[in-house]
Amino acid sequence: MTEYNYKDAMFNFLLESMGMIANTTAMIADYSWEAKFSKKQCSTVFHTVEQKRRDEKIVIDVSKLDEAQLKMLGAWRWELDSDLMLLPLWLYLMLPNGIELISITGEKKTKGKDFIGTDIRAGCVAVGIIKKVRDEK
């Protein structure tokens, strides 16, 4: 069984952020809020998370996360034996501009420079990072 390093500031920040975003989404789904107010709540949670990241000087570098951590955050492999781990939309939105990602077609894309569509496939965008498939033998 994998043991997680919950002392890792970036991983803890991402787990907490995921919870905040999920709770906001649940409130929008459960409460009878108007569309304009719901959109404002979504924007507010992302701004709150970003401010917390700045205040705590958290650098988001998903390449430092292992496969188990990435899966806990909602990432998944493009194909079972693929080295490409696709990222959930909420995590993609938090990545800094300038990070190099790989598309499902194998193209290198730079966030903030190249066009990267945010349509999702099972919760993930069509870009991610390379994480080698571990030898299970």
Image: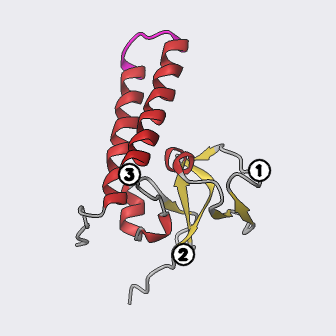
Q: Is residue 28 above or below residue 62?
A: above
Type of amino acid at the residue the image marks with label 3? Leu
Quadrant occupied by the C terminus: bottom left
What stretch of residues is rendered in magenta?
29-35
Q: Which mark is residue 81?
A: 2
Name the image quarter holding residue 5.
bottom left
Quadrant occupied by the N terminus: bottom left
Residue at the (50%, 9%) spot, across then down: 34
Q: Which mark is residue 115?
A: 1
Residue 10 lies in the magenta stretch: no
State the image coordinates of residue 32 (x, y, percent, origin top left): 41, 10
**SS type, badge 2:** loop
| Upstream in sequence: badge 1 or badge 3 | 3
* Mark 1 surroundings within 10 Å by alpha-carbon count, few (fewer than 14), some (14 through 19), many (20 or more): few
Residue picked out by circle 3: 14
Residue at the (45%, 59%) spot, across then down: 59
Q: Is residue 55 above or below residue 70?
A: above
Residue at the (71%, 46%) spot, across then down: 117
Type of amino acid at the residue the image marks with label 1? Phe
Type of amino acid at the residue the image marks with label 2? Asp
Q: How many marks?
A: 3
